[in-house]
Image (cartoon, rainbow, N blue to C red):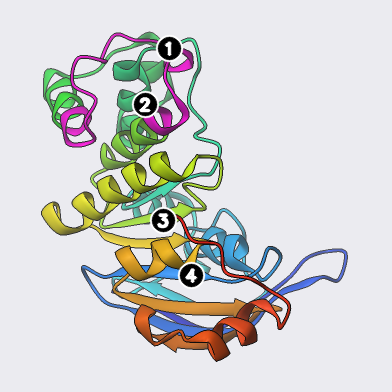
Amino acid sequence: MIQVQNLVKTYPNGTQALKGVSFDVKKGEFLVIIGLSGSGKSTLLRCMNRLHDSTSGKIEFENLEMTTLKGKTLRQARSRIGMIFQHFNLVPRKTVMTNVLTGTLARTGVLASIMGWYSEEDKKKALEYIKIVGLSGKENVRADNLSGGQQQRVAIARALMQNPKVLLADEPVASLDPATSHSVMQYLKKVNEELGVTVICNLHFLSLVRQYASRVIALKGGKMIYEGKPLDINEEWFQTIYGEDAVEVTIN
């Protein structure tokens, strides 16, 4: 479904965030990217949906070369790639329903979104996705009255409104407590397994990786140093990825 080939990203200040990263993503996978802060994980996801432009290399998504797309073609490709961020990015004063419906922006347009002109079909879909993420009954609750985990689940439902083929999740549980982290990960897994959406997720905790990932890649200093199964990351690999002095923290 996705091919990343020799991807390089150098920022204007000279920082080289990605140094020739290459990997494929198969349809229906739950791929997790791990590595220390600053290893290039977030930059990689942002290059994949063109929030950031890469310096060189290729990203092919469903046989389209994302790195060269422009205008309408780029917007259409982006609409098939949902994104979930660490800090939710919801509109605090708006309801759950309204926040989820903003996921239709790519096809409804800015004016319709501002005015709240949504089709009955979109409203029906929003209710379905709110149910999928376990928030039925919260449709009319303001986002700022929800817990952090509930807000992240609203963000998942909003991303699903794009009808994405791929869901990119950038540290989706970094701001959450351990119990809530599992809750959010379980809903991402549900989206992956029941809706067939390919998930690519940045995570810190290996205990979560082992439980939810079908495959793992690890970045270190902008380079990919591991690709394989989660359970194959032993103590030696852990120290290679995170450093000799690192201690694994488990989320139960």
Q: Residue at x 43, y 17 (%)?
A: 143
Chain-order first, disc 1 or disc 2: 1
- Position of residue 151 relative to residue 167, above or below, is above
Q: Is residue 147 magenta?
A: yes
Judge from the rendering whether residue 32 lies leftward or rightward of residue 191; answer left or right.
Answer: right
Q: Which mark is residue 168?
A: 3
Residues marked 1 and 2 touching at CB (< 8 Å): yes
- The location of residue 86, given as percent across then percent down, is 54, 43
Q: Nearer the viewer, mark 3 or mark 2?
A: 3
Residue sitting nearer the eye, 23 or 30: 30
Q: Residue at x 27, y 41 (%)?
A: 160
The part of the chain drawn in magenta is 129-151
Q: Which mark is residue 33?
A: 4
Q: Is residue 207 visible?
A: yes
Quadrant position of residue 64: bottom left
Q: Nearer the viewer, mark 1 or mark 2?
A: 1
Chain-order first, disc 4 or disc 3: 4
Q: Which mark is residue 102?
A: 2
Q: Nearer the viewer, mark 4 or mark 1?
A: 4
Q: Nearer the viewer, mark 4 or mark 3?
A: 4
Real-space Cα separation, disc 1 to disc 2, in angstroms: 10 Å
Judged from the image, the secondary structure of the residue bearing numbered disc 3 is strand
| Residue type highlighted by circle 3 | Leu
Residue sitting nearer the eye, 182 or 81: 182
Residues marked 1 and 3 touching at CB (< 8 Å): no
